[in-house]
């Protein structure tokens, strides 16, 4: 049983969750920064499903139980706002007050305006773009060459998001947006917790570089918006849809709001999808039996022709590969919220203003819900298994009102790109290039994934 506490003066009689004491000043931050993923798993083993700790001056609670996660993300979502990690000046400068970061009425309005752009029918039109861009990428590949498949997937999904957002090709402006964006995101790659906890506005070189990059990107995006506004044409892309979106009272998004939305979609939509693909290739390269079944499906369903959206219902095993990859290597490996009022969860009191974190990384590898949790096994995703799973034991796209608005877009892109590329090439890992996990803003391979290409 979990409930928001009627907070009319008395504190809940429930006790505070257990957890480590940590360092006198920094709390558990040093330990967390040293080995984030290991720490997350260790806490569950040492203290159970609800764990309380201190990060510097902030109370932080980790949740591992799907029912508790459901309470926070869905059933009692109104008692939570996004965590402080999304409210730092760094992050604000990046995505402003877009769909990912806004709250309350403003978020509701934005979601209402943006949602139609993500309807299945509208999104389906982008399927051909995805396949065409993958074909173009592969036309430069040769049998036997060694490539960083993660870098290739990043570029490919950037091209797709640029084309679908702006109806622009990767050349010129769009390419520059990609380059500047990756420069901007870099500071998030290291010392993540220090960066988000310390409200650091000092004019350090990192900050200066970040702000300069932000100005560059703003200039490009504002110009693209202005050009589109003056031409008034509906190009069938997301920007056209956002420009045309009217609220009930007739109001539209301002240039500033459009800029924030576009940046949000760039950021939320490109790396996450690239990572899903990269990890899927990594897992396939290590699991020849799975790869064999994958190839058999592609040969049977497609027989050498290009896949289309219409093939998706028959590319079931490919879809299971995507699902299972996101289970083992969830691009968004953790989600954070801040409690508005005290909250009771699993018999414990979660105090107001706690930063509450839920980790796909931990829960999706929990042996209570997944047998042989570390094994890559797309076969497990039968309808029966899916129905028997607690709803929030698997939540790569989050859940509740703030669930990913692009989840269908992402799944379609992953399945179509896996099928297009998997038809023509297979990959083997380069032995002297170990793949290391880097939990930055998303779950990245620290030094890419080097593979040898084999034409099929
Ligand atoms: C495999 C790919 C993707 C993954 C794993 C992913 C994951 C997520 C997750 C976990 C959230 C919830 C964040 C939270 O609750 O704090 C989210 C939100 C969001 N995602 Fe995705 N995402 C993916 C692809 C995309 C794509 C392709 C787009 C758009 C083109 C997109 C746009 C967004 C937006 C705008 C939000 C905020 C929604 C809101 O708060 O109303 N995502 N995503």
Image (cartoon, rainbow, N blue to C red):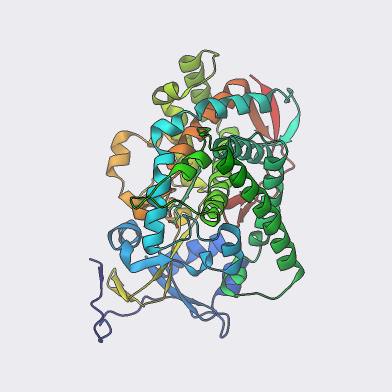
424 lies above or below 120: above
Q: Is residue 77 above or below residue 344?
A: above
Q: Is residue 252 above or below residue 227?
A: below
- Residue at 47 percent across and 37 percent down: it is 409
The quarter of the image holding the N terminus is bottom left
**Left-right relation of 59 to 227:** left
Residue depicted at x 53% and y 32%:
235
Instruction: Name the quarter where the C terminus is drawn.
Output: top right
**Which of the 4 image quadrants contains residue 186?**
bottom right
Q: Residue 282, can we see it?
A: no
Q: Nearer the viewer, residue 374 or 97?
A: 97
Q: Position of residue 112 (x, y in %)?
A: 37, 49
Residue 390, x across and y down, in percent: 30, 50
Residue 357 figure quarter: bottom left
The mark tally for this picture is 0
**Residue 284 can be seen in this image:** yes
Q: In x, y percent, where is residue 267? A: 57, 50
Residue 260, position as x, y percentages in the image: 54, 55
238 to the left or right of 353? right
């Amino acid at each position: 049983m979990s409930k928001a506490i009627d907070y009319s003066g008395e504190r809940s009689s429930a006790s505070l969750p257990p957890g480590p004491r940590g360092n006198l000043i920094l709390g558990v931050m040093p330990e967390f920064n040293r080995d984030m993923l290991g720490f997350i798993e260790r806490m569950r083993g040492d203290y159970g499903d609800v764990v309380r700790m201190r990060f510097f001056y902030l109370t932080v609670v980790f949740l591992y139980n799907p029912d508790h996660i459901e309470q926070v993300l869905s059933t009692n979502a109104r008692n939570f706002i996004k965590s402080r990690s999304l409210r730092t000046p760094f992050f604000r400068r990046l995505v402003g007050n877009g769909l990912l970061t806004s709250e309350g009425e403003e978020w509701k309005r934005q979601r209402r305006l943006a949602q139609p752009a993500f309807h299945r029918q509208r999104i389906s039109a982008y399927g051909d773009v995805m396949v065409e861009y993958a074909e173009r990428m592969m036309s430069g590949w040769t049998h036997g060459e060694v490539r960083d498949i993660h870098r290739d997937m990043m570029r490919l999904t950037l091209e797709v998001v640029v084309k679908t957002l702006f109806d622009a090709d990767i050349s010129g402006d769009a390419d520059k947006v990609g380059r500047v964006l990756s420069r901007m995101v870099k500071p998030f790659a290291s010392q993540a917790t220090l960066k988000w906890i310390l409200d650091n506005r000092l004019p350090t070189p990192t900050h200066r570089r970040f702000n300069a990059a932000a100005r560059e990107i703003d200039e490009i995006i504002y110009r693209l918006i202005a050009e589109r506004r003056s031409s008034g044409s509906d190009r069938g892309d997301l920007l056209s849809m956002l420009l045309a979106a009217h609220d009930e009272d007739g109001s539209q998004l301002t240039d500033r709001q459009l800029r924030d939305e576009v940046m949000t979609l760039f950021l939320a939509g490109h790396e996450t999808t690239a990572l899903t693909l990269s990890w899927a290739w990594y897992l396939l390269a290590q699991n020849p039996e799975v790869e064999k079944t994958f190839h058999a499906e592609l040969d049977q369903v497609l027989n050498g022709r290009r896949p289309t959206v219409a093939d998706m219902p028959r590319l079931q095993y490919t879809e299971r590969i995507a699902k299972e990859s996101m289970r083992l290597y969830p691009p968004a490996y953790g989600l954070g919220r801040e409690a508005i009022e005290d909250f009771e969860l699993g018999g414990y009191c979660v105090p107001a203003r706690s930063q509450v974190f839920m980790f796909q990384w931990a829960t999706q590898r929990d042996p209570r819900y997944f047998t042989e949790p570390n094994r890559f096994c797309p076969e497990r995703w039968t309808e029966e298994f899916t129905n028997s799973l607690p709803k929030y034991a698997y939540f790569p796209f989050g859940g509740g009102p703030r669930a990913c608005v692009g989840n269908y877009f992402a799944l379609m892109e992953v399945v179509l790109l896996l099928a297009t590329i998997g038809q023509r090439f297979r990959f083997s890992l380069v032995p002297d290039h170990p793949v290391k996990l880097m939990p930055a803003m998303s779950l990245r391979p620290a030094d890419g994934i080097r593979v040898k290409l084999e034409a099929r």
